[in-house]
Image: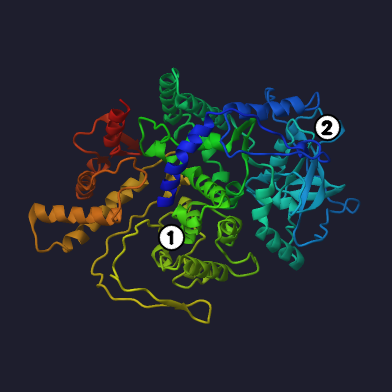
Amino acid sequence: MKWLKRLSRRTKESSDAGTGGSGTSQRAAVDHHVDTPGQVTTNGQPPTCAEERAEELEAATTATPGTETCNEQQPTAEPTPPPAPATTSKRKPFAYTPLKQPRNFRILHLQRRLRDLRTDHRALPLEGSIVEASLDNPPEYFALSYTWGDATPVACITISGAPLAITASCAAALRRMLRGKTERLIWVDSICINQAADAAARAERNTQVAMMEDVYRRAVKVLVHLSEGTEATDVACQAIKSLQAAYLKAKVAGPLQAEGRVEYERVADDVLAYTPEFPYGKLYPVLSLPWFRRTWVFQEVALAKDVMFYCGASMMHFWTLIIAADFTRLPYSKLNSESLHWRQYLERHHAVQEFVRRHEAGEPVSNFGMSLLSLVAGVALSLEAGRPHDKIYGLYGVCARLGFRLPDPDYDKPVAVVYTEAARAIVQHDANLDILSVTEGSAGAAAFGLPSWVPDFSGSIHRWTPDNPPHLHLTTRTDKRVSGDSSWTYDFLPDGRSLRVRGRRLDIIVAVGTPWKTDHSTTLLGNAVENSGQYADSLVACIGTWHAVAQQQRKGRSGDDADADAVAALVRVLLNGEAPKHRLEPLSNATIARCLAVLIERAHTPDSVQRTRLVLPEDTLADVNFVGNFWIMQVLALERDRNNKRLR
């Protein structure tokens, strides 16, 4: 989207400059002593490697003797967490008491018992108490961000002597937060919000969800627990830190800058290399973790003052991941679709976090080139949620912070009502009918009973298959002039579901090509172990029908001219009037037409092997990607040549 591109250009230099500084990570007093006030300040600058190291050293230097520290080697055998204690008549389950004031919330005071000071954190029994506080004057606390995963409560935490069942992922995250610590004052959604199904609990949950904007904004730091770690994620975390270190060295002016650039190229080559152990490169084991796909965590990061990631024994700052995943920052000399892929995992989180900061500093949202539709639909398309309601409610806080108004959370409402109310809010705020351009298909009408004009926000690009096609379509084209200078009009009917608009008949559809039916379960987007090449096979299968449709519109011409006109028409349609996204420099329409002509030729060849050779005659093996049985042209080679010349 354009606003992502503009943000990248605007913030790149300021963030680059910030990464070269030095500083120390200031610790909140509540991390260990909740009765001692302290101050935590942030200057908005990304941390250096030294700051992350300081955070790790903090755990080592503040731990009680005998406890595990961040500098110790992990034991070979995995310690077994204590079993969840059985709930008996002698131990009644923890019972929530109603909050005393509308602006109050609960915080978990997580503690390590004295007799457990020498216990490995992964085997700690979980204990603590609940502190009720006001969001208008809270103590210093942290906020936990994690993925719920399997919702089955198989673990337990003892709260003031009473057991509370929690999920395995929650228990693992809490134990990691106690590594090198004696206590934490931390907000955990599944514990601090009553998750019961009764009417009172549902009402409280609706109120608390609406307050999450303040919960995350007022936290000293958001602590993201990605996973307990594996050998593969350990390698990935080290690769991420190596990329940041090499990047910082290459950005600091001086005699070592050239050496730093060479080192960055070497590290990037190693990290991005496809090997049997790492078929998608060394970033994949971390960036493929479920956290990066969840809707709720988006605003948890976007609203945070500061963010620290935990994965196994590793700790990484948010900026470390941003720098490591974005190979355009120097840029990397061998940019291609594989290296450009990784920045999308946190690009939107970073962009909106920056927009929130600038808006709070007084800058109007209109400067960001972002609409309510682009924010809601973009997140809905790229992220997932366990409950369909959360595709809207999971953005409530960040939208409120930016001045956008979404319907108040109410989980008792049907999905159709929630999505219709959100769509209505989008139309009214953005003052246009662009929402009609993103609504695709009728699956939402069948699944939830949605009106035809309301998008189905429930799907995700990661789940697209031939049986589960896209429900949303995003476009950045802004030069739509189909209606000339006439103005659009609309009104909502009293039934709350109907949108009445005035339209104009433009033409009659006379031919339709075969849809491109991709199966993302066979690709990196769907976390496939290896890309099968299904997307290329399905494209070759349908591209010939698209060409035939274009040829029908060129009946007055013949031979090569007709074919050239048809291909040129296809290029214009596929690009939607704009240069290809994610390119540093756009490819010419002529180059794209040559590549398209190869696809069309392969679609008509009966030779099954020849159909898999999607390459130009001048391509060398260095310019070819091997995906499944397919040889696929690497058209970004032209851009690499331009980049290399510019660097020289």
Residue 249: which numbered mark, if any?
A: none
What kind of residue is marked 1?
Leu
Q: Residue at x 74, y 30 (%)?
A: 180
Q: Residue at x 56, y 32 (%)?
A: 233
Residue 126 seen = no
- Locate residue 127 relative to residue 411 in the image: left or right: right
Q: Residue at x 29, y 44 (%)?
A: 586
Spatial distance from mark 1 to mark 2, Cα to Cα?
51 Å
- Locate residue 418 relative to residue 341 in the image: left or right: right
Residue 581 seen = yes
Closest to the observer: 74 or 528?
74
**Mark 2 element type:** helix
Quadrant showing the C terminus: top left
Mark 1 vs 2, N-terminal side: 2
User: Which quarter of the picture shows residue 64?
Assistant: top right
Say few, some or many: other residues with alpha carbon within 10 Å of mark 2 (under 14 / 14 to 19 / 20 or more).
some
Closest to the observer: 263 or 136?
136
Residue 472: which numbered mark, if any?
A: 1
Q: Position of residue 572 (x, y in %)?
A: 25, 55
- Locate residue 452 relative to residue 62 in the image: left or right: left
Closest to the observer: 348 or 460?
348
The residue to which callout 2 is attached is 116
